[in-house]
Image (cartoon, rainbow, N blue to C red):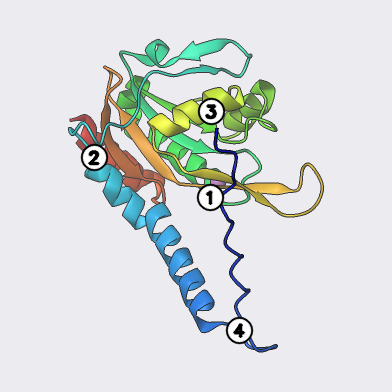
Amino acid sequence: MNTTTRPVPPPDPPPRIPPGTAPPNRILYATMGIVLAVLLIGAGGFLWLSGGRGTNLGRIGGPFTLEDGNGKPITARDFHGNYMLIYFGYTFCPDVCPTTLNAVAAAMDKLGPAASHVRPLFITVDPRRDTPSVVKQYAAAFGPSITGLTGTPAEIAQVAKEYRVYYAEHRTGPGPEDYSMDHSSVLYLMGPDGNFIAPVRADQSGDEIAADLKKLMG
Ligand code: NI
């Protein structure tokens, strides 16, 4: 038996940067990374979702098991027969989530009788803080039409993966509660059969969202 060990090459020496000089490449790459991320989360991600309809590679959505505001298990099947308008966010969100949910509630008012066939769902990406009672109270604050859903971290990870939702914890301090959640912001319209119909832009007014829904629901 050969017990000789392979010689380990010496580690690369650290790059030599004169003190006080920022390496221009690193700044360039960091900037490019941020620009790419913003494009993916914003318009790029939206177009990516738009182009995904009807292709296997682009499959969006799927069965999920989550918890409603009373902590009761709820599945995608419970909404079959109605359109689902799904938004992923979190209750501590300072701006985007409340703005979007206000617009969704306004869109439901605008839709009139057709709204009775649409179930707007708010699914948290922060299940640690957003317990069933928290999402219930939060969703109710925007109006009776919106249902807040949460789940275990594993359940949330699974549904986020199925809907291609990006989310990540962003530390804001040393404490356990010192974090915000970065997350993509798209409304997903799912048909009465549970299948994905189209994304709806979340950065629209209630009137605009209602107009999109009317068009998409035929
Ligand atoms: Ni948000």
Could you tell me which residue is drawn at 65 percent across and 27 percent down?
137
Residue carrying label 2: 52
Could you tell me which residue is drawn at 28 percent across and 48 percent down?
48
Element under label 1? helix
Query: Is residue 37 depicted above or below 145 in this figure?
Result: below
Element under label 3? helix
Between disc 4 and disc 3, whose residue precedes? 4
* Residue 50 point in image, percent of width and height: 25, 44
* Residue 17 point in image, percent of width and height: 62, 84
Callout in the foreground (4, 3): 4
Between disc 3 and disc 2, whose residue precedes? 2
Question: Which amino acid is tagged 3?
Answer: Ile
Q: CA distance from mark 4 to mark 1?
A: 34 Å
Between disc 3 and disc 1, whose residue precedes? 1
Crowd rating for badge 2 (residues with CA inside 10 Å; few <14, some 14–19, many 20+): some
Q: Quadrant of residue 83?
A: top left
Q: CA distance from mark 4 to mark 2?
A: 41 Å
Callout 4 touching callout 3 (CB < 8 Å):
no
Picture disc at residue 96: 1
Q: CA distance from mark 3 to mark 1?
A: 20 Å
Callout 4 touching callout 1 (CB < 8 Å):
no
Query: Is residue 32 depicted above or below 119 in this figure?
Result: below
Element under label 4? loop
Residue carrying label 4: 22
Element under label 2? loop
